[in-house]
Amino acid sequence: MERQYDIIIIGAGPAGMSASIYASRAGLKTAMLEMGAPGGKLIKTYEIANWPGIKETAGAQLASDMFEHATAFGSEYLYGNVVQIQDGTEYKKILCEDGTCYEARAVIVASGTKERMLQIPGEVENIGRGVSYCAVCDGAFFKGKDVVVIGGGNSALEEALYLSQFAGSVHIVIRRDVFRGDAIIQQRIKDNPKIHVIKKHIPVRILDDGMRVSGIVLAHSDTLEEMTLECMGIFPYIGQDPATSFLQGLDVLNAQGYLLVDENCETTCKGIYGAGDVIHKQLRQVVTATSDGAIAAQHAFHQLKGI
Ligand code: NAP
């Protein structure tokens, strides 16, 4: 009985923590179920500059403030790696990798996305030896060194700017001749003398000296002519994939694995909701994630109370 809740929220990023505030303030027995530290991508983001009311703040600070708020009304924080959700009658079962089973009358999936890998030779074996998917976590190890960032979206551009504080040089490699990231960040990239852009090149393989990364081989997108870039750090930021493998048994995902929800953030399985980056939508931002979390929790509250 101890493991029964009104609402279980899977994931404690901005969407999950916002849902936690709304559900627990409404008096529902609520828990967040998370496999890591609270904050989601916030804790891997150096600076947040589009959270209304605060012009600039560190991602880790905003995560910490949100967590304090998300647990202030009695919501519990549980550790667990969810492997399956079973859509029962009144209670849904949430099964974790360690065998623990939780039950909840409503489930809000706010599990976010995970970094896409390059899937080229030399990548996996050099993780932690120069290949990193988190500039905020590992950037300081590359003081004065040459590093390469792969990708031209907002994540790649923001993290390249962050890395330029430590690194000797930062090369950004994009496979087309245009960026995906916002114009304001593109301008900051252009203005930064430490950052150099290599257009129309794709990563082919990562080189190492037996101990750690020593360079990367790139091929021209059109001619396939190869060039080698010497570097000690490689930061791939080539997009995200939804963390939804535990939902495979339920018919709630689109072809890309994102969760399909209606205007109440509810899936076609009654009582199972989605919020934040994990759902199919256009704009993935902290502010839209928190909005989804609030909508899902409020609707779940109304359903559970029969309002
Ligand atoms: P993204 O916007 O999808 O950009 C991915 C980048 O990686 C693109 O430049 C893409 O190239 C490139 N790419 C993809 N696969 C590749 C491959 N195999 N080899 C080489 N390059 C590859 O991903 P993101 O930057 O992670 O952002 C995800 C979402 O979060 C976006 O909606 C973004 O706006 C949002 N976000 C917002 C902020 C902010 O507002 N401050 C910060 C971070 C993220 P192509 O362009 O050629 O496809």
Image: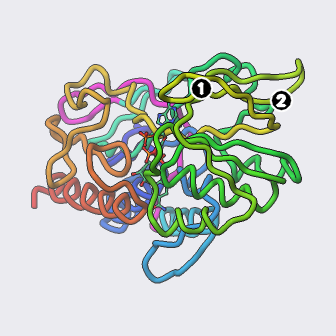
User: Residue 225 in the image: x percent, y percent?
Assistant: 60, 23
Figure quadrant of the C terminus: bottom left
Q: CA distance from mark 2 to mark 1?
A: 17 Å
The location of residue 241, given as percent across then percent down, is 42, 34
- Relative to 241, 169 lies left or right: right
- Counting from the top left corner in percent of width and height, residue 42 is at 56, 57
In the figure, residue 107 lies in which quadrant?
Answer: top left
Range of residues picked out in magenta: 73-93
Residue 152 or 45: which is nearer the viewer?
152
Going by the numbered disc 1, the residue's amino acid type is: Ala
Circle number at residue 102:
none
Q: Residue furthest left?
A: 307
As drawn, 194 above or below 96: below
Quadrant location of the N terminus in the rendered image: top left
Marker count (numbered): 2
* Amino acid type assigned to the residue bearing label 2 in the image: Ser
Precedes in sequence: disc 2 or disc 1: 2
Q: Residues within 10 Å of mark 2 (few under 14, many from 20)?
A: many
- Point 47% across, 45% down: residue: 177
> Which one is in front, 207 or 81?
207
- Name the residue located 81 percent from the left edge and 45 percent from the top edge: 146
Give the number of the mark in front: 2 or 1: 1
Disc marking residue 214? 2
Classify residue 184 as left or right of residue 105. Answer: right
Locate residue 277, reporting x and y percent: 38, 48
Front in this rendered view, residue 171 or 101:
171
Label drawn at residue 219:
1
